[in-house]
Image (cartoon, grey):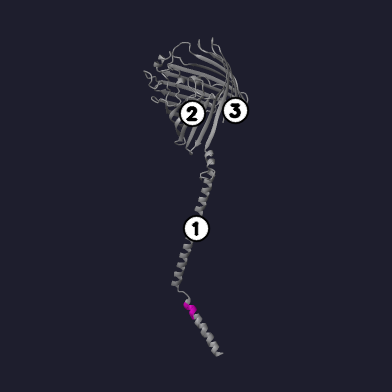
Amino acid sequence: MKKSTAGLVLGLCTTATVAVAETPSAEEMWVIIQQQQAEIARLKQQVAAADEEIRETSVKVEAAADLLEEGAIAGSGSAASSWSENTQLGGYGELHYNNLEDDKAGGEDIDELDFHRFVFYLGHQFSESTRLFAEVELEHSLVEGGEDSGEVELEQAYIEHDLNSAHRLKAGLFLIPVGILNQTHEPDTFYGVERNPVENKIIPTTWWEGGLALGGELAPGWNYEVAFTSGLGLDSAEGEWKIRDGRQKVAEADASDPAYTFNLEYTGIAGLQLGLTLQYQQDLYQGAHTADVDAMLYEADLSYQNGPFGLRALAASWDIEDAISAFKAGADRQEGWYVEPSWRVARELGIFTRYSEWDNQAGGGGDTQYAQWNLGFNYWLEERVVFKVDYQLQDSPDGKSEYDGLNLGVGWSF
């Protein structure tokens, strides 16, 4: 028993001694703590790196999903969807029936049905600041060659870019900013089957050129456009002198003498739009005449809508170099004006009357002036689908055709 007790005591003492020997000192404890802190920091860095990798992966997955939705991944089958979301299609068309009697002795009456215009419109948004506008028009339904054939025309094709929130630049083929109808002439936007004669013979609508234009907002309600474009080109060999005959339509147009246009619009009062245009043509014959025939166009217009009452009025005048009188006496001044009150009887129905005067030989002092009354109505089957009826009475110079009678039409835009 004594030996066993002594052995037990000896074992306990040995264990205690070993335990005491294994207990680290304060310095050793400090080293251990530092090592543990370093390990914890390393583990935190690994966790943070893993979180960042997960976040970046998540962002890439979301971006890929967005690209798939926008149709930007080739072969995904959704590229067409992206293209269509940024592209607009539209157009307008109008069919006319004219039954007009020529009061001139021996004159020829007009009794015809004509699909006057079919226009296809394309617009594409390249980005928030850059876009394309284009229009292709088929006139008179058929193109087969010959004097009475229709035409296929590129009426607009230009790039527009926003310089900032207030100003924009466009380049290409575009409509000249002048008058009421030249830039907005869809059939559901105006009264009467045919476009008014002043904005046909004097302006001359539809009128487009190629070049550059800067436009935008000068102040609230005040908008401007300045254009540098190709000019009109009358044919001296053919003896042309009417302004409308000078449209080159940017078809290999002679650009020897360009034109400059300034347009100012005021829309600061609800329902009112006022317009003013000045245009300078360097030479109406593009250097083909023995003398330069420069010209200045002055144009002012008013559009007003107050409830059911509407009013449109326009005046335009060309001041042309006297040398044009060698082709036609009095052609150095070509001018016209009209006034058109209207009343919207109901949402679907509006009535109007219009009085127009125009003269392409106003500088001669002779009997060369035309006048015309139109009276009729528009019936909007839908907001952009319209049926039109008007009766015209024309007063022409002696010896000229004088057309009185009925015009019917249907038109649409979208």
For residue 154, the mark is 2
User: Is label 3 or label 1 in front?
Assistant: 3
Q: Main secondary structure of the magenta part?
A: helix
107 or 164: nearer the viewer: 107
Which residue is tagged 1? 50
Q: Position of residue 160 (x, y in %)?
A: 46, 34
Q: Is residue 182 magenta?
A: no
Residue 271, position in %: x, y?
55, 27
Query: Which quadrant is home to the C terminus?
Result: top right
Element assignment for label 2: strand
Does 357 sit above or below residue 69?
above
Residue indicated by mark 3: 385
Spatial distance from mark 3 to mark 1, Cα to Cα? 63 Å
Residue range corresponding to the magenta coloring: 17-21
Which element carries disc 3, helix, strand or loop?
A: strand
Point out the tag, 3 or 1, that comes first from the N-terminus: 1
Q: Quadrant of the N terminus?
A: bottom right
Q: Earlier in the sequence, mark 2 or mark 3?
A: 2
